[in-house]
Image (tube, rainbow, N blue to C red):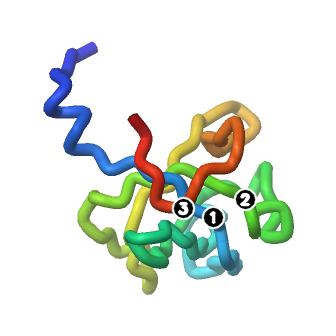
Amino acid sequence: MEQIVWSDFEKIMMVAGTILRVESFPEARKPAYKIWVDFGPYGERKTSAQVTSLYTPETLVGRQVIGIINFPEKQVGPFRSQFLLSGFETEEGVVLAALERPVPNGTRLS
């Protein structure tokens, strides 16, 4: 495992946001949703996430999540992904990284 220094960590913008909207993404190669998240002062951003095996759109809307918002945009089929949704890959599917209690949207992980 390669070690990083503090200045490497400081470059990563991991911030809290609230899921506003979720849509199915039938054009994706693997089952996925299109997800829109409010990151407070960083605005609303969208992503594609392969979280369909453990979550329904109804269980995602309103949930606070952790997003990495300073990656370059990525083309996913006909959709532009604007951030990376954090989670943990398990045999059952991706488990979203969760906050222990609510924080203001846009709060940075430290």
* Quadrant holding the C terminus: top left
Q: Secondary structure at mark 1?
A: strand
Q: Is residue 107 above or below residue 90?
A: below
Mark 1 and 3 residues: CB-CB less than 8 Å, in contact?
Answer: yes
Return the disc, 1 or 3, that comes first in the chain's sequence.
Answer: 1
Q: Is residue 15 above or below residue 59?
A: above
Is 40 positioned to the left or the right of 24 in the image? left
How far, Cα to Cα, is label 2 from label 3? Answer: 11 Å
How far, Cα to Cα, is label 1 from label 2? Answer: 6 Å
Q: Name the amino acid type tagged 3.
A: Asn
Q: Secondary structure at mark 2?
A: loop
Return the disc, 2 or 3, that comes first in the chain's sequence.
Answer: 2
Residue at left 28%, top 14%? 1
Q: Quadrant of residue 18?
A: bottom right
Mark 2 and 3 residues: CB-CB less than 8 Å, in contact?
Answer: no
Q: Which residue is mark 2?
A: 63
Q: Which residue is mark 3?
A: 105
Q: Name the amino acid type tagged 2.
A: Arg
Mark nearest the camera among 2 and 3 is: 3
Return the disc, 1 or 2, that comes first in the chain's sequence.
Answer: 1
Mark 1 and 2 residues: CB-CB less than 8 Å, in contact?
Answer: yes
Q: Quadrant of residue 58?
A: bottom right
